[in-house]
Amino acid sequence: MQRAEYKRIRIKKVDYRGWNTADWEFTYRESGTKYRTIDRGFVVDESQGYALMYTAKAADWDGKSRKDTWATLTKTFEPKS
């Protein structure tokens, strides 16, 4: 079995629509390929919490497509009412 080789980049509180939010960013290796992930966790009220997660190959992380996709995901998310 191959080890995941997890490496934390950061866990940091971020400003996101006024909700209690943190981004957890990390890399890991799976089947010889290195990936990078951002996982945004947040609490919107007393009974609802969410996470938005995006993963891409680490070699492609700085590309425009990844940045555009993450921006769209975070701008268009709406919690269940």
Image: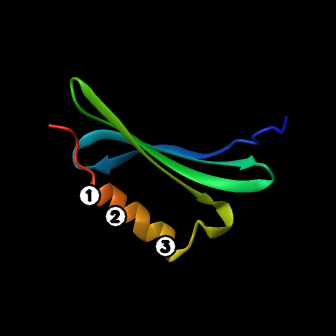
Q: Position of residue 62 (x, y in %)?
A: 57, 70
Q: Earlier in the sequence, mark 2 or mark 3?
A: 3
Q: What is the crowding at mark 3: few (fewer than 14 residues within 10 Å), some, or many (at least 20)?
A: few
> Residues under labels 2 and 3: Cα distance?
11 Å
Q: Give the residue type at disc 2.
A: Thr
Q: CA distance from mark 2 to mark 1?
A: 6 Å
Q: Quadrant of the C terminus?
A: top left
In front: 6, or 52?
Answer: 52
For the N terminus, the image quarter is top right
Mark 3 sits on what residue?
A: 65
Residue 60, image x and y in percent? 62, 69
Contact flag, marks 2 and 1 (Cβ < 8 Å): yes
Residue 50 shown left or right of residue 81 in the figure: right
Q: Amino acid at mark 1?
A: Thr
Mark 1 burial class by Cα count in 10 Å: few <14, some 14-19, many 20+: few
Instruction: Determine which residue is flagged by label 2.
Output: 72
Q: Residue at x 22, y 42 (%)?
A: 79
The outermost residue toward the right is 1
Q: Along the polypeptide, which appears first: circle 3 or circle 1?
A: 3
What residue is pinned by disc 1?
76
- Look at label 3 and name its amino acid: Ser
Instruction: Say the numbered circle drawn on residue 12.
Output: none
Q: Secondary structure at mark 1?
A: helix
Q: Secondary structure at mark 3?
A: helix
Locate residue 54 relative to residue 13 in the image: left or right. right
**Residue 15: x and y, percent?**
31, 49
Callouts 2 and 3 close, C-beta under 8 Å: no
